[in-house]
Image: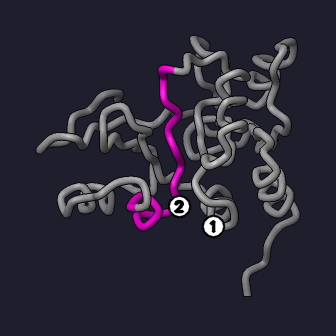
Amino acid sequence: MEVISPILQKAASAIKSGLILVCPTDTVYGLIADATNKKAVARIYQIKKRSKHKLLPLFVKDIRMAKKFYRINPAQEEFLKNNWPGPVTVVFKKGKPALRMPDDKFLLALMKRVGPLAETSANISGQPATTKVQEVIEYFKDQKYQPDIILNGGDLKSTKPSRVIDLTGSKPIILRK
C-alpha cells in the first residue's frame, strides 16, 4: 500500500488546477506546471520572463512516458536506460521540447498522479539557476508575475543544471555540460 504525503496530495491538486510551483529537483530549484495545460505553461514564460522561442523542457516519469512524445529508437532507448533517472536532458527532435527524467522520488510520484511536467530553473531568464530557496524567493519577490506556491526543500546540495544531450543524429552530442 502506497502512503501519499499531504504535501504530494496538495502539490498534485495545485498542478491539476493550473498553478505554478517552485519545487526542489535533483539539480536546482525548478518552476513546474502541468505540461498539458497551455495557460499554465504560458504563465511559466511570464514568471521567468523567458522568450517564447525558447522551449520549456518536460519532466517525464519513465521511458514509457517519453515514448508518448517521441518515437525512440533502440540506440536512444539504450542511452536513456544508462542515463535516466538523472541530470540529463535529451533533445529528440529539433524545435520540439527536450525531455528529462529527474532522479527525485517526489517529482516521480507527482508525475505518476498528474502526468508530464513543463519545467525550467526557478529564476528570471539571464539569472543563474540556484540550489538555495532564499535566492528563489528573492528572484520573484518584487516581480509582477510570481509562482503560486514555493515548496521549501531547504538548500539543496550544490550542483549544476542538467547536461543537455542531442540525440537527433547517429551519435549523442553534448549541448550543455
Which quadrant of the structure image shows residue 177? top left
Magenta stretch bounds? 53-67
Taking depth in this image into account, of 147 and 88 the one nearest to the observer is 147
| Residue drawn at point x = 59 percent, y = 24 percent | 129
Mark 2 belongs to which amino acid?
Lys
Q: What residue sits right under mark 2 in the picture?
A: 61
Say whether residue 114 is left or right of residue 84.
right
Q: CA distance from mark 2 to mark 1?
A: 7 Å
Which quadrant of the structure image shows residue 48? top right
| Residue 61 falls inside the magenta stretch | yes
Say whether residue 41 is left or right of residue 141.
left
| Residue drawn at point x = 82 percent, y = 14 percent | 143
Label 2 close to label 1 by CB (< 8 Å): yes
Residue 87 is situated, as x and y percent measured from the top left of the image, at 45, 44
Taking depth in this image into account, of 156 and 108 the one nearest to the observer is 108
Height in image: 42 above or below 109?
Answer: above
Say whether residue 51 is left or right of residue 6.
left
Q: What residue sits right under mark 1 in the picture?
A: 112
